[in-house]
Amino acid sequence: MIAILAVDDAMRFSVRAGLIVIVMMEMEFELMSGIGGTRWRIGNGTNISLLNENWLCDASSLSVQDTKVSLTATLIVADVIMPNEKNWNLPLLSSMFEHNSVQKIIKTPLYDSVTEDKHIWHKEKDGVYSVKSAYRLCVQEELDTSHLKMTGDWNLIWKLKVPPRVKNLVWRVCRQCIPTRTNLQNRGVNCTTVCALCNEYDEDSGHIFFDCLSSSNIWSMCTFNHVITAGLQHYAGVTELIFAVLQQLNVDEAALMACIIWSIWKQRNNQIWNNVTDAQSVVFSRAVTTLHDWCVVQVIRNDTREQQRIIEHKWKKPNNGRVKCNIDASFSRNLNRVGIGICIRDEYGIYVMAKYDQFSPICDVRIGEALGLLSALRWVHELNFGPVDFELDSKLVVDSFRSNKYNDSEFGEIIAHCRRLFSLLYNNSSVEFIRRQANKIVHSLSKAATYVASPQILVNIPNCIEHLLINEML
Ligand SMILES: [Zn+2]
């Protein structure tokens, strides 16, 4: 964050940041007392008060204002969960709370895999307290940094097809934090402000990149010089000018413009630090050559990546004597449901069986994918196939499954459940990541699974994957 601040702002920020560290150390106490960045993870709900505790999916809580009838303060979350099943007791909730609050409650998922109520750190995905996120929380809540934000479509810069060093320089020019002589003097550096290229005017970013005679001569070599000239008449600030011009240029012109800005800055530095005067034609051709060389490297890289992609993105049969089980999840906001597609194929790539499974309410993508793995692990072992290669396209789920890192969140509990089932029920089996393009069959199945009325086992090949299966067997 410091990097985007001007020097004065950075100084002020670091002094206040020191104070923030002190506040942050006290945050650990806040964590213990349940204030700040924490929320409840619902297990059986016996330790969580129904009112005034932040157990809803958005980490908020219910209060007496949300109720239809007067409720006793001793009610707990377990009181509104159906006995013997992990579902909300909808009729009871509707009799207790206003409609909007009931909707909020039923959007809060309950998971079989989570058995213990726990107060977890809401500001980290793994639910584990970290000083880093506590610091971020304090900065957000304690410091007003809105005055440091600059308006403008910054993506115009980040999407430029130019080397990163060029993007970085253009960004610094637009944030007005490059060390022009005027900027340096404003920050208390004892130096001249005269432009090193023309020795006439003050060197600020507007002058050095556009107004200086040397720079205007360079821009006049470009086919889009008229856009810059028109822009100079409309915009007083260099940032507004650059944004306005970038917006009007096509991709190649915008890239060349950025490279020329970079090359002019190099020309200025060469003059000041090396006492070398780059001719204007050299400045222009350096921009063109830099851009061209970078583009050539990108094309070679893309070709290699494309070859790699073709190899990686194809589904492969399992080795002899094994079956492969692909898994994917789809999310339907309209139906408030997660669909799970599971497909088993044998060593010849032949379809064996598939399954549609589903969960409600809709949840985080990573949780939906983890529920997919859990569903497959529960089902496939009943079929007694021997060694199974499970494959899914969520790298996060596969990496978490293999990692021993502590994770307090609902996701962590589901993954831990998967790990327990896997070691208990499977021998000589594996859980692997594959690219989405090689997991198309279960992607189609998972989409269909959001629409079916209830989970189904598919002994025959469903129509939606017939053509994909044939393609993958070839
Ligand atoms: Zn000048």
Image (cartoon, helix red, strand yellow):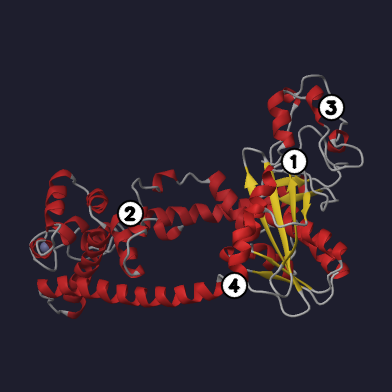
Task: Return the x and y of residue 50 as percentages of the image width and height.
Answer: 81, 34
Residue 26 in view, yes or no: no
C-alpha gap between disc 4 and disc 2: 44 Å
Q: Residues within 10 Å of mark 2 (few under 14, many from 20)?
A: some
Tag 3: amino acid: Leu
Q: Which residue is mark 4?
A: 474
Q: Residues within 10 Å of mark 3 (few under 14, many from 20)?
A: some
The tag earlier along the polypeptide, 3 or 2, is 3
Residue 194 in view, yes or no: yes
Verify CB contact (< 8 Å) between mark 3 and mark 1: no
The quadrant where residue 301 appears:
bottom left
Quarter placement of the C terminus: bottom right
Q: Nearer the viewer, residue 263 or 250?
A: 250
Q: Which residue is mark 1?
A: 453
Q: Which residue is mark 2?
A: 156
**Does the closest atom of ligand 1 sit within 8 Å of the Cβ of label 1?**
no
Tag 4: amino acid: Leu
Q: Nearer the viewer, residue 120 or 218?
A: 218
C-alpha gap between disc 4 and disc 3: 55 Å
Number of the front mark, 4 or 1: 4
Task: Return the x and y of residue 329 as percentages of the image width and height.
Answer: 67, 54
Task: Find residue 92 and name its label.
Answer: 3
In this rendering, position of residue 196 left or right of residue 51: left
Number of the front mark, 4 or 2: 4
C-alpha gap between disc 2 and disc 1: 46 Å
In this rendering, position of residue 416 left or right of residue 276: right
Q: Secondary structure at mark 2?
A: helix
At x 57% / y 71%, what residue is drawn?
A: 314
